[in-house]
């Protein structure tokens, strides 16, 4: 293995950094979902709200580890966290799918293209959010039983299902994409030194 190839591979330090900040990424998502989800409309838009602070964390990981496989590793860890937390299987599957697509897109920019990393983040965010919406749209009875079993009232879940299957669904997609870009741009602004060091343009 030549020096350049070794430099481009994920090191143990890279894996530790990815693990730590993926955990922070997940905690950020959980907190936003918990707070925003106090009202049904807030939960529908929780992906958009979380995209701004999570965008900062995501772009930090990209700046610190602009290497092949870093997004896949992050997605696997993130999916495992959601699976262990007892969420519907559609969520970890959507996380993995978003991660694969983001990895492909970022790889075309050699992991240092800011805009390609941003598009990748937008895909991860929207597809993960769609994983939450999937059961609300296609398995309503299952979701009612799942959500009420975790403490939500039937009235809350019914209203949530109505919102998820109405015009608000489409509005939430658009707002989520916009907020993902805003989160990435804010991350670049706050982490300018790290971006310059990584040569991310």
Image (cartoon, rainbow, N blue to C red):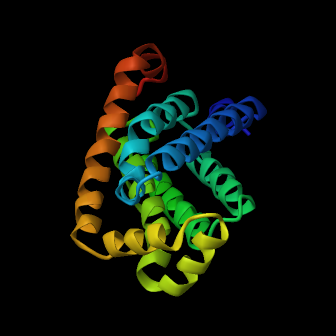
Residue at 70 percent of width and 63 percent of height: 83
Q: Look at the picture and state if 94 lies above or below 198.
A: below
For residue 135, side relative to residue 84 (left or right):
left
For residue 20, side relative to residue 117 (left or right):
right
The image position of residue 163, as x and y in percent, is: 32, 69
Q: Look at the picture and state if 52 lies above or below 130.
A: above
Residue at 42 percent of width and 67 percent of height: 130
Q: Look at the picture and state if 71 lies above or below 113.
A: below
Residue at 34 percent of width and 20 percent of height: 189
Count every numbered label the image shows and give the total: 0
37 and 12: which is toward the camera: 37
The image position of residue 87, as x and y in percent, is: 64, 65
The image position of residue 159, as x and y in percent, is: 38, 70
The reply to whether residue 201 is visible in this rendering is no
Where residue 171 sits, quadrant-wise, is bottom left
The image position of residue 180, as x and y in percent, is: 34, 44
The reply to whether residue 96 is visible in this rendering is yes
Residue lying furthest right? 12
**Which part of the image, by quadrant, shows the N terminus?**
top right
81 and 77: which is toward the camera: 81
**Which part of the image, by quadrant, shows the C terminus?**
top left
Residue lying furthest top? 193
Residue at 36 percent of width and 35 percent of height: 183
């Amino acid at each position: 293995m030549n020096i350049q190839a070794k430099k481009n591979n994920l090191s143990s330090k890279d894996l530790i950094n990815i693990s730590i900040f993926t955990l922070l990424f997940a905690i950020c998502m959980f907190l936003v979902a918990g707070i925003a989800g106090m009202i049904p409309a807030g939960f529908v838009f929780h992906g958009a709200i979380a995209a701004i602070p999570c965008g900062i964390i995501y772009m930090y990981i990209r700046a610190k580890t602009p290497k092949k496989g870093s997004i896949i590793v992050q997605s696997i860890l993130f999916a495992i966290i959601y699976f262990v937390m007892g969420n519907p299987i559609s969520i970890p599957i959507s996380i993995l799918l978003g991660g694969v697509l983001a990895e492909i897109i970022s790889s075309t920019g050699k992991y240092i293209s800011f805009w390609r990393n941003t598009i990748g983040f937008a895909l991860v965010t929207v597809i993960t959010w769609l994983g939450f919406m999937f059961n609300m749209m296609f398995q309503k009875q299952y979701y009612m039983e799942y959500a009420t079993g975790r403490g939500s009232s039937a009235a809350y879940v019914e209203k949530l299902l109505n919102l998820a299957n109405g015009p608000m669904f489409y509005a939430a997609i658009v707002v989520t994409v916009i907020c993902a870009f805003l989160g990435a741009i804010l991350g670049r602004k706050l982490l300018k030194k790290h971006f310059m060091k990584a040569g991310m343009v």
